[in-house]
Image (cartoon, rainbow, N blue to C red):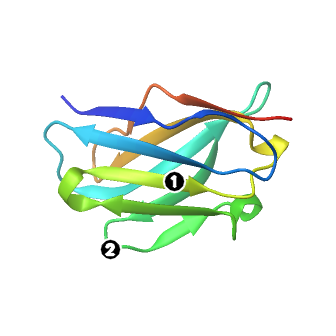
Amino acid sequence: QVQLVESGGGLVQPGGSLRLSCAASGIIFSVKAMGWYRQAPGKEREMVARIFSGGSTEYTDSVKGRFTISRDNAKNTVYLQMNSLKPEDTAVYYCNLDLWGRPNYWGQGTQVTVSS
């Protein structure tokens, strides 16, 4: 059984920073990518950032230059460093584990609120 446990969300003022963490546990193999998605009220879930098994990354345009995804393979953990946060970044952020040939796994979500 694979589990993803997220941490690091919270309330931050515009321009501030937060770092999200997602620790994966269980029997994990054939990883295609790990990533972060977010869902704001009334909107569809969207991909924010992903890091592939080979180390390449991709970001949605709205966070390029502000967010950085990284990973610690030894800890099966992926991080999302979020800088210069804006009110439009407010959402529930979900960790995702994308495996080759198997269903995706999702974390429980962590709330990020950017407000003064």
- Of residues 115 and 97, which is closer to you in this image? 115
Q: Which residue is mark 2?
A: 54
Q: Which corner quadrant of the image does residue 3 belong to?
A: top left
Residue most extreme to the right:
116
Q: Where is residue 78? Give x, y as percent.
A: 38, 52
- At x 51%, y 28%, the residue is 109
Q: Where is residue 42? Give x, y as percent.
A: 80, 25
Q: Quadrant of the N terminus?
A: top left
Q: Where is residue 100? Give x, y as percent.
A: 29, 54
Q: Where is residue 38? Give x, y as percent.
A: 63, 39
Q: Is residue 72 left or right of residue 18?
A: left
Q: Residues within 10 Å of mark 1 (few under 14, many from 20)?
A: many
Q: Quadrant of the C terminus?
A: top right
Res 113 visible = yes
Q: Is residue 52 left or right of residue 75?
A: right
Residue 68, numbered label:
none
Q: Is residue 2 left or right of residue 49?
A: left
Q: Are marks 2 and 1 in contact (CB under 8 Å)?
A: no
Separation (CA) of disc 2 from disc 1: 18 Å
